Amino acid sequence: MWNKSLLIFIRYFLILIMISGIVINKINLSTSMIIFIFVFLINNQIRFFSLDKTVYKIISIIIELTFVVLAYKWIGGYLITYLILVAIDSNILFKKPVKHIFNLVIILQGIMFSLNETLEFKLINIGLLIIIIAILYLIEDESDKKVEAQLLYDKLRLSEEKLMTANRDLEVYASSIEELTLLRERNRLSREIHDSVGHALSAIVVQLGAIERTIENNQQVAKEVTKDLRKFAQNSLNEVRMAVREIKPKEFEEYEGILIIEELIKNFKKLTGIDVRLAFTKEKWPLNSDQAYVIYRIVQEFLANSVRHGKATLIQIFMVFNDYKLVVSLKDNGLGAHNVVEGIGLKSMRERVTEIGGIFDYTTNPLEGFLVKIELDKVEKLKIHSQEEGNGED
């Protein structure tokens, strides 16, 4: 608040004027006077530079106010230097209402010493003293306003950063949900076509096969007709299968593992009412069966532990795909802990990750929740496309 170097300069300047005034008024100083002056100065310096507790500073100010009376009456000098030095310390070292009390006492001392003095003396010692105390009040008030403004600015800056971070998280989350919703709908349509039309045509093929075996009249003609119908039905079935493959997006393979996890989270939210947020990067690659299974089990275990042990109300899961690795972070806002003894759950997580060559780690602190982080290397997923035979089997 105050510039300490400037204050030290002003203090020593006033002390120099005070000593000069004493020397001018008392050319011959006795030993007791010199000792008194030294005690006066020592008390003043100890108060400003060494005392920490407010009560000790108050006692030191009271001693100095007493010394001012004795020094001015006994030794002499310039009254204004004594009082200004005390006034500076009073306004710097104390807060309201203590400094108000000492400032009032200082002004009353100035008035008391000036009662029998000339008007010029009164103006210099009382008027100047009041002006300096008022200036000290103004300086402190301006400093307090600057400090309050800085604190407000820091709070606003932190709030803005938190808001920006939350906004980014919401954008990623919204984008992820939008993509997942679209893929779920397209996948649902593909299942509907496959289950209805595909199975119906399969049934036709089977029935035509039965007709071939049971027709007795004009068996040769009937056999040819049924063969043609069978071929037609088989071709229709193949066309439906091709349509299903076209409708089902290629990106679904990349999202397949994520969709399973998303379904797990949706069911968990319904059962517990806890807010669980899943987000992932725009760029992604398909998980192989081992990776998808391990991530699913770890998410399952983490959700259960967050409720059972952490008493969490918010869980965030973020999947970061890059060119070489998948990093999955699972964070809750639960109770956390000082020291964690790995139980069956944590050991199982670690074993599952290490078995497929991944890295498993976790951190926690009291009241800061629990964070689990796993890293899995990118592995090309083996894509096996079954060769469909023309016998009508799905």
Image: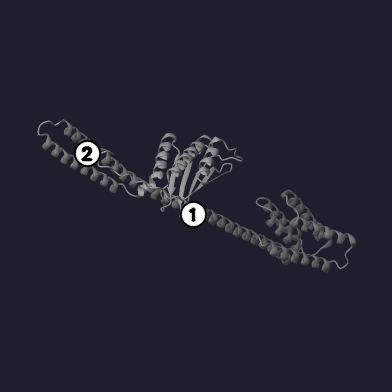
Under circle 1, the secondary element is: helix
Q: Residue furthest left?
A: 218
Residue toward you, 82 or 118: 82
Can you say which quadrant of the picture contains the N terminus? bottom right
The structure residue drawn at horizontal position 82% and vertical position 69%, both measured from the top left corner, is 24
Q: Residue at x 42, y 42 (%)?
A: 261
- Disc with the residue nearer the chain's start (2 vs 1): 1
In this view, 71 is above or below 277: below
Q: Determine whether 28 is above or below 197 in the image.
A: below
Horizontal side, residue 25 vs residue 6: left or right: right
Q: Report the residue that reaches farthest toward the front.
A: 220
Mark 2 or mark 1, which is nearer to you? 2
* Location of mark 1 (residue): 160
Q: Quick one: 80 or 171, which is closer to the camera? A: 171
Q: Is residue 180 among what the camera can see?
A: yes
Mark 2 lies on a secondary structure that is helix
Where is residue 289? Give x, y as percent: 42, 43
Q: CA distance from mark 2 to mark 1?
A: 61 Å
Q: Position of residue 2 (x, y in %)?
A: 66, 60
- Kind of residue sitting beneath label 2: Leu
Query: Which amino acid type is shown beneath numbered disc 1?
Result: Glu
Q: Residues within 10 Å of mark 1 (few under 14, many from 20)?
A: few
Residue 201: give its label.
2
